Structures are given as structure tokens and as C-alpha cells.
Amino acid sequence: MFNVLKKIWNTIQSQSKERGIYITFLMNLSHVIGIIRAIFYKLLYVKGMKSSIFSLQANSRIEIFNKKSKVRIGKFVYIRKNASIRIDFSGQLDIEDYVFINDNCNINCVNRIRIGKHTKIAPNVCINDHDHNYKGEDRDHLLRGEVIIGENVWIGANVVILRDTVIGDNSIVAAGSVVKGDIPSNTLYMNKRENKFVHYPAKVMRDTV
């Protein structure tokens, strides 16, 4: 505990020199409020959620919809604003230490999702371990799988991660990618993009205005 407090104090001193005392105060006040919100959710879901110290910023929420659902959140996880984390059925969500989740991210877990230590997730990322069974071939309306994200992974903005995906340690997923399947460790993954231009006479545009 002493080492943690010492680290916090040193960080505040460093921030004060770089940002100014007032801005540092506001920023750390936001962190404190985020920790209080995280404690609230831990108390709300006392049976389904295990966690250490983490921060849950404004308008972000954790929803556990089933007594079989379990969530574990490691120490110093930081979840920014407007994130939605939902766990249902027998879902097992494991967010390990020092994970950073940016604004407007969505995590939907009905089976298993694990996010490894020191992984950083950019804004507007969507992670799902299931699909809807639109073919209706059996009673279950969901097709369930797993999403395993390794340690020290960087997930770019607007990425969609689908069920049955494994992302190896130290990998980077480029912004805007759709991911399904295995990504080896120490790999940069990106979807191929092609620009397509369709030209039309100016008269067509004038007629539609």
C-alpha cells in the first residue's frame, strides 16, 4: 500500500509541473469519481463481480443480467466515458491489470471474453463473443464463441472483434478493422481497403437537389 501511495504522489507532482495545479486537480478529481462509480457497481453486483481498484468514468456502465454471469476486473483498469459492458447467460468476462478502454466502447459477453494485461483499446471498439442465429437451425438464438485478447495489445479506433477470435500478445489491430480468427503475436493486422470512385454527370446531381 505504501508503494502505491508513493507512486500516486510522485505522479501528481509530475503532472502538476507539466499541466499546472488546477488542471491536475480537475483531472484527478475525475479519477476519484470514476473509482467511486466503480465501487458502486462492485457493491451492486457483489456476487457476480470481483475487482481490484479500477476507474469507471461518466456514463459508462456494467450490466450483469444472469446469476451465472461473472466479471473479474484487475487492478488499475481504466474505463473512459460512455462505455457499455454487458454480461449475460453464463458469460465470463476477465479484464486483467492495467487495461485501458477508451470512450464509447461496447463489450457484449455471453460465453467468454478475456483481455490481457496492459492492453489498450481505442474509442468506438465493439467486442462480441456471439452472433445472432439468424438461420434458426436450433433453439438457441445465439451462436456462442470466445474472444481472447493477449497482453500488451493495441486495438485501434472503430474496430469490430467477432466471436472465435484470438489476438496474440504485442499485436496491433489497425483502425476500422473487422477481426475474426487468429492473429499471431507480434503482428500488425489490417483489413485491405480499396478506394472506389464512381463518376457521374453534373446534371444528375442538379436534378436531385
Image (spheres, helix red, strand yellow):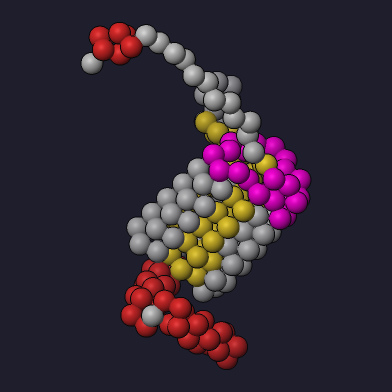
Please tell me whether residue 113 belongs to the stretch shown in magenta: no
Q: Which of these two is toward me, 99 or 170?
A: 170
- The percent coordinates of residue 150 (x first, y second) are 69, 54
Left or right: residue 170 compared with residue 206 = right
- The percent coordinates of residue 207 (x first, y second) are 25, 9
For image coordinates 37% across by 83% down, the residue present is 21
The quarter of the picture where residue 190 lies is top right
Left or right: residue 28 compared with residue 76 = left
For image coordinates 43% across by 54% down, the residue present is 103
For image coordinates 51% across by 57% down, the residue present is 101
- Which region shows up in magenta? 166-188
Mark yes or no: residue 54 visible: yes
Residue at the extreme bottom: 2
Q: Which of these two is toward me, 140 or 102?
A: 102
Question: Which quadrant: the N terminus?
Answer: bottom right
Question: Which quadrant: the C terminus?
Answer: top left
Left or right: residue 185 compared with residue 72 = right
Q: Which of these two is toward me, 36 or 190?
A: 190
